[in-house]
Amino acid sequence: MRRLWNYMWERPDDYRLITYLFLKGLALIYFAAFYSLAPQIEGLAGSKGILPLIDEQAALTQQYGIWRFFLSPSLFWLHASDSFLILVASAGILCSLMLFLGAFPRLMLISLYVLYLSLYHAGSLFMNFQWETLLLEAGFLAIFLAHGGSRLVIWLMRWLLFRLRFLSGMSKIISGDPTWAGFTALNTYFETQPLPHKGSWYAHQLPEWLLKVGTAGTLVVEILVPFLFLAPRRLRMIGAAITIVWQLLIIATSNHNFINLLTILLCLYLFDDDALRHAMPERMRNFGNNVLAELMYGESRIEKILLAFSASFIVVASSLQVFFMLTASSAPAWAGAIDNVARAYSVSNRYHVFPVMDTQRLELITEWSYDGQTWQPLEFEYKPGHPMRAPEFIVPHHPRLDWIMWFVPKGGAPFVYTYQRFLDRLREGSAPVVSLLPIDTFKHGPPKYFRAHIARYTFADATSIRETGRWWNIRYHSPMWLPPVPYKPW
């Protein structure tokens, strides 16, 4: 046991180049996340935003009292103004650039984690996605990589990647969704995903037999391949290669912000420096010999204590999450308390990517009017709207309002409520909310009237695109009735 303990605290020389590249890549992903969020955050969570942070904090204060600081850790308990929201997002951009340049890596990694965790809680529904928690979980572990990284941290990175991929696959089985069971999920996925791009259209044209092979392949890559991550070196690298190829295929056919890039980055720790050098041009093979001399710094006693405590908590919390997710059993109170803490600080999370697949694309078409007689459709920046507008490739950008709108036709109370708040802000002429829409929307002031329709969108065929420029076929349904929905914080 003592030998194992000493082994886990070793700082292996054969991962110095891996760690160097991982921190550079993480800095770029942090930059993309903060840069995408900064111009949106005021319209989403500002005082005149769709779901104001101050309302969220008031609800949390009433419900949890003093415990709110621990269950929703955030810098915004100190100050919750619009300018501070923007300042925190802007500080994240600056810190990510400094991390990329190698300035004060430990301080920058701590700062980035705290800043993004604060925005994660401030953004409520708009930040309630798995890529946020994945970035926070990886970002927290990366704090212990600032001056290298023991084998314990490397193992935790692999454990994170294993959980991300394995639970994403198992969630598809557990859900009982017939499209996954019948290998037809990809028959509709490319058309029905939240924000398709042109590559999605091309993938949708593939023959049905190939789409079924792709569906089966997805299950294999997500459920079986992750076990290679925990295997010896050669098998680990095979698992990494398969996963990376699959993530590149997803990027080529889907707009999923930065999650696929972050998954590829996590795969680095399935390789080692020798493997990377063999893949480099000969003139660059000595690149890692002299990089990051600071990676050889030893850890202080306090750093070891913090890492040991964090690792123990993450292993326990994540193991419980895996067990209760796979068994679909109710967690006892003590396990629920551990899960609440893990999720509050986003150091361990459950992952379930597309466990249920939509078989048709329903879009909520919002129309607005100044007089109640003449109506115009409300266009969004990226989500499907006008049939002549081609779907755009926007990775790693994440337009959060457009993404949330994909959920509204499904009728979930939080999403319908958010949509109603969105329309209320538009009636008020809230500049931060209007800025989330294309430029020159409502040039003559805020409209007085709104109405909504549900429509089914399907990809147009190649002939229609070539002859008319039409990318979508639209079939209107009856107007959507949107009853008032009471709001509860999530």
Image (tube, rainbow, N blue to C red):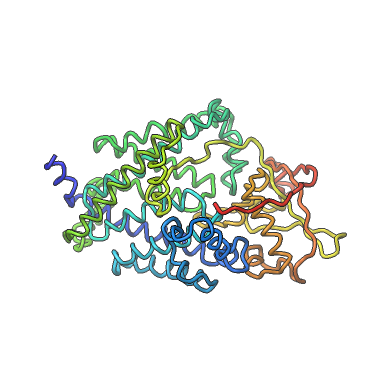
Q: Quadrant of residue 433?
A: bottom right
Residue farthest top in this picture: 182
As drawn, is 219 to the left or to the right of 382? Answer: left
**Residue 55: image location, x then y, percent:** 58, 63
Residue farthest right in this picture: 373
Q: Residue at x 59, y 49 (%)?
A: 195
- Relative vertical location of residue 152 with respect to residue 90 in this rendering, above or below: above
- Relative vertical location of residue 8 with respect to residue 98 in this rendering, above or below: above
Q: Residue at x 16, y 44 (%)?
A: 5
Residue farthest bottom in this picture: 83
Q: Quadrant of residue 318?
A: top left
**Residue 248: image location, x then y, percent:** 45, 45
All told, the count of numbered labels is 0
**Residue 239: image location, x then y, percent:** 34, 37
Nearer-the-camera pick, 246 or 481? 481
- Relative vertical location of residue 253 with respect to residue 176 in this rendering, above or below: below
As drawn, is 115 to the left or to the right of 431? Answer: left
Nearer-the-camera pick, 83 or 397? 83
Image quarter in which the N terminus is found: top left
**Residue 159: image location, x then y, percent:** 32, 42
